[in-house]
Amino acid sequence: MKLLVIGCGGVATVAIHKCCQNPLFTEICIASRTVSKCEALAAKLAPTTSAKLTTATVNADSVESLVTLMKAFKPHTVLNVALPYQDLTIMDACLECGANYVDTANYEAEDTDDPEWRKIYEKRCQEKGFTAYFDYSWQWAYQEKFKKAGLTALLGTGFDPGVTSVFTAYALKHYFDEIHYIDILDCNGGDHGYPFATNFNPEINLREVSANGSYWENGHWVETKPMEIKREYNFDGVGQKDMYLLHHEEIESLAKNIPNVKRIRFFMTFGQSYLTHMNCLQNVGMLGTTPIEFEGHEIVPIKFLKALLPDPASLGARTVGKTNIGCIFTGIKDGKKKSVYIYNICDHQEAYKETGLQAISYTTGVPAMIGTALVASGTWSGAGVFNVEEFDPDPYMDMLNQYGLPWVVNENPVLVD
Ligand code: NDP
């Protein structure tokens, strides 16, 4: 089966490592903006796999560049692990070339000052009630096109979104008649020793964390100020951590796909040093996405900041500790109220030993491979645009155990108030 992977950053590197371990993928083309990174990874992995590895340069912002590559390589499935900015161009190219599409993050506009985009965004803010720059409407709008083409688009198969939504489908299938409350808890207990660094692409990460929070309750969105809601939780394998309520994309799809759900919240842990740095950078304008003129050059502040910060792909060697990411569900089974917590613990150094990357890239790259494999093998099939919770969770849960992200079910969890 021919797979085209677009992007060659932290998440892509892990996903490609894992694709090389899966005999389903007989030919893998690694294509990205900087082809030297693709070549170095292909050279490293070639002796470890029976898959034929090739590389290519591609500008994923250009449908034309993508179509040229796809017409030459003829992929069965395309895994997009570039940036959310490229989701729509890659979906368009897949439709034109007859390939299935898989990604790990929903569409986000790179230029949030573009007046055309802004008009649609402001209408959506009013209609839906949350102000995040990213949402599923852009990609769900491709439903008819993928249906007509007889192709599958699988959205959001990272850890969160991704595994958290598969945990939800699994809980609903095996533990509940109805799920009423979902709390998604994302804890990173890792320490990289820098005063400030982000664990994945800084631009995407800082935009997400500095935005308003929101949660879904009784059929509508409730929006909060950034970091307004704080809780403490004692995480298995990590210990006591502060966590903050954020807006997160799987809330939107779970609210649509899980019947009778009353509330969905997402919490992420942050240390005080991270928050102090982020607030300071925001206050001085370094998170801005609008270009400014500096000594005759145009500079986008957040892109300049990205150039100064450590490359997330370089954090692996120095990050110690564990992540613990999962969901606490409360609902009804056989007329009785119950709660279940499903989570995975991932060790940064173990992830590094296997792939050269820390656990944040690992916990995203492994599920990226799993979702891709389920689509490519036809185990998850159907024409249209799907979120992962719409398919049978069992084969995905088995592959999490098989490919390095084993999970735990706790039927008596401590709840979040
Ligand atoms: P990186 O910045 O490390 O990697 C992005 C890669 O995409 C780089 O190789 C980059 O090339 C390439 N790229 C960027 N723009 C283009 C373009 N126009 N054309 C071709 N290639 C391009 O990001 P991460 O690996 O940290 O993240 C990858 C994706 O995973 C993101 O969409 C992120 O949101 C998502 N993610 C999802 C998570 C989940 O749990 N669902 C968690 C974490 C991340 P170059 O090397 O030249 O910069």
Image (cartoon, helix red, strand yellow):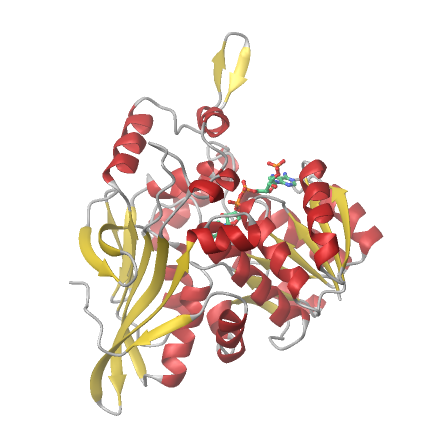
218 or 321, nearer to the observer: 321
83 or 115, nearer to the observer: 83
For the view shown, which residue lies furthest in the bottom direction?
Answer: 334
Residue at image point 56% right, 60% down: 368
Residue 256 in the figure: left or right of residue 214: right
What is the quadrant of residue 51 in the picture?
bottom right
Q: Is 109 located above or below residue 92 in the figure?
A: above
What is the quadrant of residue 237 in the picture?
bottom left
Residue at image point 49% right, 22% down: 291
x, y percent for residue 53: 76, 53
x, y percent for residue 385: 57, 65
Q: Is 125 located above or below residue 387 in the figure?
A: above
Quarter occupied by the N terminus? bottom right
For the view shown, which residue lies furthest in the top direction?
Answer: 295
Quarter for ligand 1?
A: top right
Q: Please give the count of numbered marks on the rendered protein.
A: 0
Residue at image point 38% right, 47% down: 320
Quick check: can you spot residue 106? Answer: no
Quick check: can you spot residue 173? Answer: yes
x, y percent for residue 54: 78, 50
300 or 278, nearer to the observer: 278
x, y percent for residue 371: 57, 66
For the view shown, which residue lies furthest in the right direction?
Answer: 72
Quarter occupied by the C terminus? bottom left
For the view shown, which residue lies furthest in the left direction?
Answer: 417
Q: Is 169 located above or below residue 291 in the figure?
A: below
Residue 278 in the figure: left or right of residue 57: left
